[in-house]
Image (cartoon, rainbow, N blue to C red):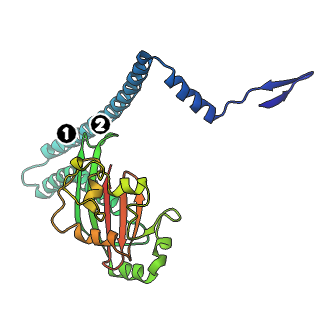
Amino acid sequence: MRLRLCPAVFQAEPQTDIASITLLGILNFNVRTPVENSNHIFNDLRVRMNFFAVILGVLAICALLFIAAIAILFIGLRRMWRRTRPNQLVPRTLIIAFGLGAIALPCVALKISERNSVLARVPKPLEVAEIEYRLEESWGVGFMPGDNETGFVVYRLTDDSANWARKQGSQLGNMLEGAKRAWRETPVDDSSDQIAIGQWHHYDRDPDMMAVERPKHHPPTIFEYLEKYGFTISIAQGRDHEANQSIQSTGSFYSYGKGGSVTIIDPGRGKVYFAYAG
C-alpha cells in the first residue's frame, strides 16, 4: 500500500506488483472450467501460429525481393550483351564474369557467415586452427522456433592458443570468455542432483528410451548427452572418444550454454568440443 496526499485527506491507493499478477493468473487458470482451459490453450496455439505466419510472410517477401533484384540485374546484363559485338571479347567476358559473380556471391556470403557462426562458439581468447569434425542435423522447417537440433563439432586450436591454455592450469576457467564461475573443471558432474542426472543420464529411469543399452552405473558420454530428446545423430566412429575421455577425467573445463549446449575445453589435446541437443 502507498499513501497519496490529497488537499484534505489521505487516500490509500493499491499497488499491484508482478508477483501478484502472476499469482492471480495462475489462480485464474486453475479456476477455469475445462472448456475455458481448452479455449485458453487454443488461443495460445493460434497466437503461435500467427507468429509463424508472420515469420514466413517476412521470409517470403525477402525472397521475392532477392529474386526481383537478380532478375533486374540479369535484364540489364542482357541489354549490355546485345549492345556489344561478337568481336568485343573483353566487354562480353566482363559481362559473363559479372553475371556469374552475382550468382556465386550470395552462396559465398552464406558459407562465410555460417563458418563465422560455427567459430563463434569457441570462447575467446582461444583461436581455432581448423574444424576437425562437424555433424549438425535439424528436424523441422530448419529456421522456426521449436525445431529439434542436434550437433557435435570438434575444433583444433592453434599451437600458440593450445600452449597458452595449458600454461593457465587450473586458472584457465577464469581466463575464458563467459559469466563468472561458468566454467567448471572436469570430470563433469553427472550425479550430484536431478539437474546433473538429467543433463547426462536423461533416460536412466526409462531404459526403453535409450538408443543403446547401458549398464545401471555408467560414465557420462557425449552420445548420451545428445540423445536426451530422442533426436540422435550418427557420429563417425571414434570421433567422440576423445571428448568422452575429456569429460570423464581431470584437466579439462566445461560450460553449459544456450540451446542445450555444452562446450568442453581440453588443453592437453589442444581441442574444443561443442555438443548440443535442443
Badge 1, how many Cα within 10 Å: few under 14, some, many 20+?
A: few
In the rendered image, which quarter is residue 225 located in?
bottom left
Name the residue tied to disc 2.
Answer: 65
From this viewpoint, is residue 14 visible? yes
In the rendered view of the protein, which quadrant contains the N terminus?
A: top right
Tag 2 and tag 1, C-beta contact below 8 Å? no
Q: Secondary structure at mark 1?
A: helix
Residue at mark 2 to residue at mark 1: CA–CA distance: 15 Å
In this view, the residue farthest toward the right is: 8
Comparing 212 with 68, the one in front is 212
Residue appearing at x 19%, y 55% in the figure: 212
Which of pointers 2 and 1 lies earlier in the amino acid sequence? 2
Name the residue tied to disc 1.
Answer: 75
Q: Nearer the viewer, mark 2 or mark 1?
A: 2
Residue 78 on image: x %, y %: 15, 42
Q: Please name the amino acid that badge 2 sits on.
A: Leu
Residue 234 on image: x %, y %: 17, 57
Residue appearing at x 50%, y 24% in the figure: 30
Residue appearing at x 46%, y 70% in the figure: 176
Q: Please name the amino acid that badge 1 sits on.
A: Ile
Examine the rendered structure and indicate whether residue 39 appears above or below residue 149: above
Residue appearing at x 29%, y 60% in the figure: 115
From this viewpoint, is residue 120 visible? no
Badge 2, how many Cα within 10 Å: few under 14, some, many 20+?
A: few
In the rendered image, which quarter is residue 57 located in?
top left
In this image, 4 relative to 123: left or right? right
Residue 252 on image: x %, y %: 38, 73
